[in-house]
């Protein structure tokens, strides 16, 4: 076998071994205590995303000892490859888990019925149950995320909300218009920098495993802002805030606007600026989380 092919086999073996051992490291009680001790000694590289680093390092040392570059390749590719392999496995398992628990939203029938239909993130065993659900949907609590955490496109007219540039949004905020700015980015993004005076109600939360939906988004918005409030919604580039505007318009808010370009601006696939954001335009910016406008305070507001 040629050296190149041998290296590829070693890399594949190290990825597989690191993936298996990292799952054991995260889920086995004895190994979890060992990982906790490592975390106390090396807190900066002990999170879940680093669980596959240690098995990859051990595998690299076992497979090669004479070539530093080969060792580096085995460790780096074994670590990241195992991490993403575990993400794929977890996603597949979660999908199977969700499908194995399918139950009709109306009558409670289980997935033994082969004719289940999937509508707006919900499951129904027949079109009769789907029709029954539609009759009561006006009194039901709005649903904006499905069971996989994907945003459900709301059935609203395209012009149900306006769009403004960051400069136009600032003019509205500084004028006697009654508009308020709501930053729908995650709390860490908001705390690093946000438009001056903005409130924070995240549409998604940022966690170590990625972005996860905020199931309380509509509840907190409805508790803090009446339906007639004039809302300017912004995020990092304008995508999340457009979805938030769509959800609020469907929930009955009558004056909603999306801020195009958001805080960080819009770029094309080559990194070129398509539309400047709030920060690049030099508009007023604050950092931190004000006591009366941060999400922690707004979520507890009565």
Image (cartoon, helix red, strand yellow):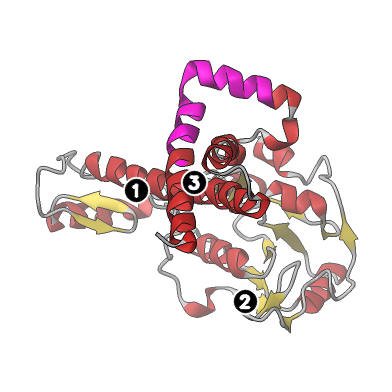
Residue 72 to residue 31: above or below: below
Instruction: Mark 1: give few (<14), some (14-19) or many (20+) Cα within 10 Å.
Output: few
Q: How many marks?
A: 3
Q: Quadrant of residue 51?
A: top right
Give the camera-side residue of 40 and 294: 40
Estimate the x, y position of residue 202 in percent, counting from the top left.
64, 51
- Quadrant in which the N terminus appears: bottom left
Indicate whether residue 301 is drawn in magenta.
no
Left-right relation of 282 to 272 = right
SS under mark 2: strand
- Region of the chain picked out in magenta, as a range: 19-38
Q: Distance from label 3 to label 1 (Cα)?
A: 15 Å
Residue under numbered circle 1:
92
Residue 17 to residue 5: above or below: above
What residue sits 84% from the left and 44% below the top?
290
SS under mark 3: helix
Give the camera-side residue of 214 and 91: 91
What residue sits 79% from the left and 56% below the top?
198
């Amino acid at each position: 076998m040629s050296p190149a092919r041998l290296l590829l086999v070693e890399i594949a073996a190290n990825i597989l071994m690191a993936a298996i051992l990292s799952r054991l490291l995260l889920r086995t009680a004895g190994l979890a205590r060992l990982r906790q001790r490592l975390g106390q000694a090396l807190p900066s590289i002990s999170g879940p995303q680093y669980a596959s680093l240690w098995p990859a390092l051990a595998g690299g040392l076992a497979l090669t000892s004479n070539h530093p570059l080969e060792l580096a390749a085995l460790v780096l590719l074994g670590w990241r490859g195992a991490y993403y392999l575990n993400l794929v496995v977890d996603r597949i398992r979660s999908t199977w888990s969700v499908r194995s628990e399918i139950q009709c939203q109306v009558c409670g029938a289980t997935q033994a019925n082969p004719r289940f239909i999937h509508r707006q993130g919900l499951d129904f065993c027949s079109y009769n149950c789907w029709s029954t659900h539609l009759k009561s949907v006006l009194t039901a609590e709005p649903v904006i995320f499905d069971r996989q955490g994907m945003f459900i496109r709301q059935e609203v007219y395209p012009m149900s909300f306006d769009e403004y540039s960051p400069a136009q949004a600032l003019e509205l905020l500084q004028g006697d218009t009654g508009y308020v700015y709501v930053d729908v980015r995650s709390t860490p993004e908001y705390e690093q920098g946000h438009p001056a005076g903005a409130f924070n109600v995240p549409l998604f939360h940022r966690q170590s495993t990625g972005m996860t939906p905020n199931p309380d988004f509509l509840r907190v918005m409805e508790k803090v802002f009446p339906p007639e409030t004039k809302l300017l919604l912004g995020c990092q580039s304008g995508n999340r805030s457009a979805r938030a505007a769509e959800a609020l318009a469907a929930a009955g808010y009558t004056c909603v606007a999306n801020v195009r370009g958001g805080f960080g601006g819009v770029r094309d696939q080559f990194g070129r600026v398509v539309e400047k954001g709030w920060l690049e335009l030099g508009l007023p910016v604050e950092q931190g989380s004000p006591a009366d406008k941060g999400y922690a305070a707004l979520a507890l507001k009565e």
